[in-house]
Image (spheres, rainbow, N blue to C red):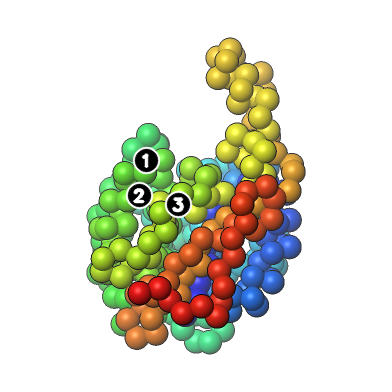
Amino acid sequence: MRLGFFGDVVGRSCREAVARHIPSLRRRLGLEFVVVNAENAAAGFGITENTAGELFAAGVDCLTLGNHAWDQKEALTYIVREERLIRPLNYPAFAAAPGRGAQLFTTDRGRRVLVINLLGRVHMDSLDDAFAAVDRELEACHLGAGADAIVVDMHAEATSEKMAMGHFCDGRASLVVGTHSHVPTADAQILPNGTAYQTDAGACADYDSVIGNQKEEPIRRFTTRISQGRFKPAEGEATLCGVFVETDEASGLARRIEPIRIGGRLSQTVPDPTMAPAG
Ligand SMILES: [Fe+2]
Ligand SMILES: [Fe+2]
């Protein structure tokens, strides 16, 4: 099965990039299932029904979230109605967080894809243990038995925590990919037991920016320590950043992972769909 995963969509120009590129990428790469992290879709802060609707209309199958999940209060009720939108799994039990942190989807071709969204605890607002939470999900739904593919979005600040999560899930998930840092890392690989991994997918954002925001306010805060306004998404053409993963039909493990960068100012790379998997 061929999957696409794209990192944090930041504001309008990035939603437009999703609408421009996802339908053609789906055709060109034969993507059966597409996941997008949408925690910054609504002007950089959270998600609304309208912004989610734009992404679904572009052909996205599942939206994941992160530390900005509830910036727009309507998300608290919208997520209850929309099963294709998932939030981090590891909220404390007493939070009674609405919606789901993991969801099993069925593709048009009848195959089952489990998507799990986690929030890291290092340099973040600390939730419950993401490792224990994902372990419960993976033990309840074995790759190759309960699901044909399993995608884990590890939304976290620390590279080490994301990498540890990759190895923790190695052999039990098709893909573990990081989000939140908004810059793609150059470490796409298949881990020793068959899980595809990249520390951060990168954002779908205008990269003439500071992690997707217009530059002036972040620079002012760094140089003066005085905030003079909100962060606003940069509005130039976005680069859509993510990964392409091909899984083995029987085991659900990865046979191939390659980065995707299309549009905007980053160096461009789109996998050749006809190429045989490496190794
Ligand atoms: Fe983000
Ligand atoms: Fe985030």
* Residue designated by label 2: 162
Residue visible at 60% across and 26% down in the picture: 218
Inspect the image, locate mark 1, and give the three-letter code of the amino acid beneath it: Ala
- The quarter of the image holding the C terminus is bottom left
Which label was assigned to residue 126? none
Q: Is mark 3 within 8 Å of ligand 1?
A: no
Judged left or right of residue 11, residue 107 is left
The answer to whether the residues at label 2 and label 1 have Cβ atoms under 8 Å apart is yes
Residue plotted at (57% across, 49% down): 203
CA separation in Å, label 2 and label 3: 14 Å
Circle 2 Cα neighbour tier, 10 Å, few/some/many (<14 / 14–19 / ≥20):
many
Q: How crowded is mark 3: few (under 14 residues within 10 Å), some or many (20 or more)?
A: few
Numbered disc in front, either 3 or 1: 3
**Quadrant of residue 161 within the rendered picture:** top left
Q: Which amino acid does label 2 sit on?
A: Lys
Task: Return the mark for residue 158.
Answer: 1
* Badge 2 vs badge 3, beta-carbon distance below 8 Å: no
Please state the horizontal and vertical placement of residue 221, each as a whole percent of the image: 58, 19
The local secondary structure at tag 3 comes to: loop
Residue placed under numbered mark 3 in the picture: 186
The answer for how far apart the CA atoms under marks 2 and 1 are is 7 Å
Real-space CA distance between mark 3 and mark 1, rounded to the nearest whole angstrom: 16 Å
Q: Is residue 253 left or right of residue 26?
A: left
Q: Is residue 22 above or below residue 112?
A: above
Q: In this view, does 101 lie above or below 127?
A: below
Which residue is located at x 49 percent, y 54 percent? Answer: 201
Q: In this view, does 117 lie above or below 119?
A: below
Horizontal and vertical percent position of residue 43: 68, 42
Above or below 214: residue 104:
below
